[in-house]
Image: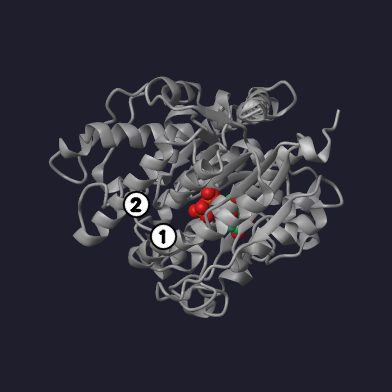
Amino acid sequence: MVAQESQRLHIVFFPLMAAGHMIPILDMAKVFATHHVKATIVTTPYNAPTFTRPLESYKNIGPPIDVEVIPFDTKEAGFPEGVENFEQFTSDEMTLRFLKAIDVLQESLEKVIEKYKPNCLVADMLFPFATDVAAKFNIPRLVFHGTNYFSQCLMDSLIKYEPYKQVLSDEEEFVVPHFPHEIKFKPSQLHTSMRGLGDKQINDEWMNIFVRAKDAEERSFGFIINSFYELEPDYAEYYKKVMGRRAWHIGPVSLCNHGKEAKFQRGKDSSINEHECLEWLDAKKPRSVVYISFGSLAEVSTLQLQEIAMGLEASNQDFIWVVRRNNYGNGEKEKNEWLPQEFEKRMEGKGLIIWGWAPQVLILDHEAIGAFVTHCGWNSTLESVSCGVPMVTWPVFAEQFYNEKLVTEILKIGVGVGAKQCNRVVEGTVKREDIKEAIRKVMVGEEALEIRNRAKKMKELAIRAFEDGGSSYSNLQSLINELSSYNA
Ligand code: UDP
């Protein structure tokens, strides 16, 4: 039975201003809305279209979701007007300045909560003030990290035991202590600030942000995770039992997008027409195309782009390659400066370059896709899992090196390309031969077949978890029940 509007549970979502956080939050809002929960998303002017555009077509197929736009003055922090998203930053210094400026949003958030009197606030980990706002109005605050259980558990162990201090060089491996699986890392795969390297002031500022976020997390109602139990059961348990956290996994939330239109319209406006993209894919044999993308933030140097082009050509596989214009100016306009001579001519019909933003889920979900060369952002990884697509893992920064371990060593649904350095810029260290080899390993031969079968099984488990009666579905139900009885 559908609840009366006045009795309906109402959740306000406040996502971080980055595609990798806004996209899953929009999906999450849709998931709650289809369970008769009223959902309102709070965002700033520059970021509003990320929600309002897809919601324009969604309103014809799903329950209404509101978007509340609050002003965001970043001028005082030294940014020109309209700089409101992580994709606009080119350095740690800018990111830190932005994260400090975010505090000014507290007042506007309070006004939104006062106006709507919702039952719960779901806010990103990097908004520590959200816990105080929720407390002021006596509602629970849930924390959204944008990642999985595994990475958060790994981070917890690294911080607690500092095993990277026990090795003598950046390239010497250490084992993650007291962990369900034997996972080895090199210090070079961890962020420099974690290891206390680099600029001291920047490290201290990161540390402050981290400590504030952790303190706010500890005072929160719990955590909401875009993952599913069967994907990482040991770590769902570790999170609760070892880390002592209350958490609800309700994913993969991208599975809420049924139909081509919803799969097409995610994040930004696509740089390719839906029909053109599908026509190209429809003409290909099942599992014959490699999809390659580095997400919304990672930068790829000219040298690396050249190696990728050559590696793709040498792999002799059909491909869709997403090239985002980045701070190196490596977009379509400059392609003559970096794309190997006559590359496009040679690859005609074999390769499709999407200059800008791709309809990723629509592509991954197409039967022609055989592998995904991914930077291991959590959304991309989980979307690949949900579509049963094996991966070539190429982590770049943030927690992506952790996600790689989950994919290659625990789930065994991908192979690593050999990325070594945790840095937002892919500098050109991965050579064409390695790219070719990794692609061929997941596309051709006996091992590829085994990987594909495991990926297929994981897709089935993902769908089952998300469906009525599945583990994520039941978790969502129990969260809704808990929120309904809070303050009742
Ligand atoms: N994405 C997309 N088209 C693109 C690039 C990215 O739709 O051309 C989406 C992708 O499907 C995912 C999100 O943007 O949902 C990127 O998040 P992820 O965590 O994978 O990486 P990040 O961009 O945060 O590094």
**In the visual, does 28 lie left or right of 229?**
right
**In the visual, does 153 lie left or right of 131?**
left
Q: Quadrant of the N terminus?
A: top right
Residue 146 appears in view: no
**In the picture shown, does residue 408 fall above or below 295?**
above
Where residue 67 appears, x then y in whole percent? 70, 56
Q: Identify which residue, 45 or 333, lies in the foreground.
A: 45
Q: Amino acid at mark 2?
A: Ile
Q: Which residue is mark 1?
A: 99
Rendered image quadrant of residue 89:
bottom left
Closer to the chain start, of discs 2 and 1, is: 1
**In the picture shown, does residue 419 fall above or below 304?**
above
Residue at mark 1: C-beta within 8 A of ligand 1: no
Name which residue lies at 41% across and 50% down: 434
Q: Identify which residue, 261 or 290, lies in the foreground.
A: 261
Rendered image quadrant of residue 428:
bottom left
Counting other residues with Cα less than 10 Å from the Cα at mark 1, is it few (<14), some (14-19), or many (20 or more)?
some
**Mark 2 touches mark 1? (CB < 8 Å):** yes
Q: Identify which residue, 104 or 379, lies in the foreground.
A: 104
Residue at mark 2: C-beta within 8 A of ligand 1: no
Residue furthest left in the image? 168
Name which residue lies at 56% across and 29% down: 248
Q: Amino acid at mark 1?
A: Leu
Residue 459 appears in view: yes
Per the rendering, the mark at residue 209 is 2
**In the visual, does 276 lie left or right of 68?**
right
Name which residue lies at 67% across and 29% down: 484
Where residue 230 appears, x then y in whole percent? 57, 23
**In the picture shown, does residue 175 fall above or below 205?**
above
